[in-house]
Amino acid sequence: MPSYRAILPIGDIRPGHHPEEVMDSAVAAVSSIATVEHTDIQILSNVPQIVVRFSLDDDGDAHFVADAMADAVSRVATTGPGRLLLRRGGRWVPR
């Protein structure tokens, strides 16, 4: 079963929401479609980004999962352009 990473830069939290809702909304969106394997928060060039690693049977649905995550998170925080990576041969490659 292929493994993916959906990575999404996070900006300001929207009024009426709390920081913990960012990851909670991401995990809820992904887990409704795929199996969540791991979550993380990283800082890249002083910009926080969430990482949700997931697996699913149908390779064609990976972009749908990443888009669902971005949509859910954008309701609680501003976001930047997301990235989707696929685990291939021990490396993470753009999907």
Image (spheres, rainbow, N blue to C red):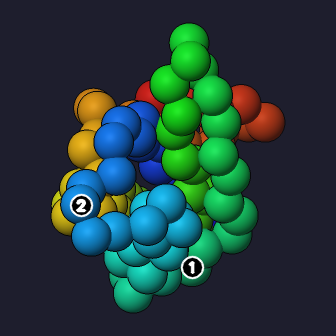
Look at the numbered discs 2 and 1 and tell me whether their residues touch, using CB distance below 8 Å: no
* Residue type of the residue flagged with mark 1: Thr
Q: Is residue 51 visible?
A: yes
Q: Which residue is mark 2?
A: 15
Q: Residue at x 25, y 56 (%)?
A: 14
Q: Is residue 34 visible?
A: no
Q: Residue at x 23, y 60 (%)?
A: 15
Q: Is residue 33 above or below residue 78?
A: below
- 10 Å neighbourhood of mark 1: few (<14), some, or many (≥20)? some
Which label sits on residue 35? 1
User: Is residue 59 found left or right of 79 in the rendered image?
Assistant: right
Which image quadrant: the N terminus? Answer: bottom right
User: Is residue 70 found left or right of 93 in the rendered image?
Assistant: left
- 10 Å neighbourhood of mark 2: few (<14), some, or many (≥20)? few
Which x, y percent locates residue 4? Answer: 55, 52
* Residue type of the residue flagged with mark 2: Pro
Q: Is residue 75 above or below residue 40?
A: below
Which x, y percent locates residue 51? Answer: 57, 49
Extreme residue toward the right, this view = 90
Labels 2 and 1: the sequence-earlier one: 2
